[in-house]
Image (cartoon, rainbow, N blue to C red):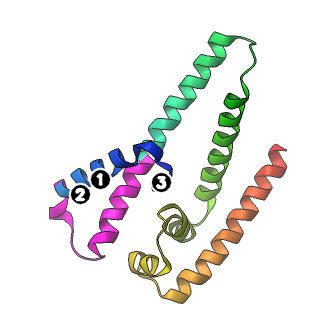
Amino acid sequence: MLLGAGSDAEDVIQEAFVKGYRSLSRYRGASSFRSWLLAIVANETRNLHRSRSRRDGLALRMAAVSSGSAQVADGGVDAVLAGERRAALVRALRLLPVRDREVIVCRFFLDLSEDETVAMLGWPRGTVKSRTSRALAKLRDLLDREEVRSG
């Protein structure tokens, strides 16, 4: 699934293609066409996540108001916990330096191969390998620290 777009992945891709088509005149060839288009897809996915977060937050607030003190079913608890884990991951990612965040997004969110990441970022292979390793270590550390603070 595209950066967590889930069932909306097709809509994200379609919107990205439309935006790409409209922006073709701005493509300068500084990077590969694939990289340029993937950047548009990533932006559209971020837009989807922002709108989902707003919608989900509103739904949770409405549920809390309407249900009063009623207990949430186990499925609801699981959904909330999964949402909290996703939110913690996003917060930790935002704390990473930009280059670390870029390599993590390429390798694990866009699921690009090492070769594709090299091409997309324009970095040497060794840089992609070492930065991926260091970025993952930083991300783990940030998530561990957040877990200690919240736990």
Q: Nearer the viewer, residue 111 or 54?
A: 111
Q: How many marks?
A: 3
The residue beneath circle 1 is 16
Badge 1: how crowded within 10 Å, few (<14), some, or many (20+)? many
Numbered circle sitting on residue 20: 2
Residue 140 placement (x, y as % from top left): 72, 63
Write the residue at 79% across / 56% down: 145
Q: Is residue 101 above or below residue 10?
A: below
Numbered circle sitting on residue 56: none
Q: CA distance from mark 1 to mark 3?
A: 15 Å
Q: Does the magenta run of residues contain 75?
A: no
The secondary structure type at the circle numbered 2 is helix
The residue beneath circle 3 is 1
The secondary structure type at the circle numbered 3 is loop
Q: Are marks 2 and 1 in contact (CB under 8 Å)?
A: yes
Badge 3: how crowded within 10 Å, few (<14), some, or many (20+)? few
Q: CA distance from mark 2 to mark 1?
A: 6 Å
- Quarter of the figure with residue 134: bottom right
**Kind of residue sitting beneath label 1:** Ala
Which residues are the magenta region? Answer: 22-46
Write the residue at 75% across / 12% down: 69
Tag in front: 1 or 3: 3
Write the residue at 47% across / 46% down: 6
Residue 127 placement (x, y as % from top left): 54, 85
- Of the numbered discs 2 and 3, the one sitting upstream in the chain is 3
Residue 27 placement (x, y as % from top left): 21, 67
**Kind of residue sitting beneath label 2:** Gly
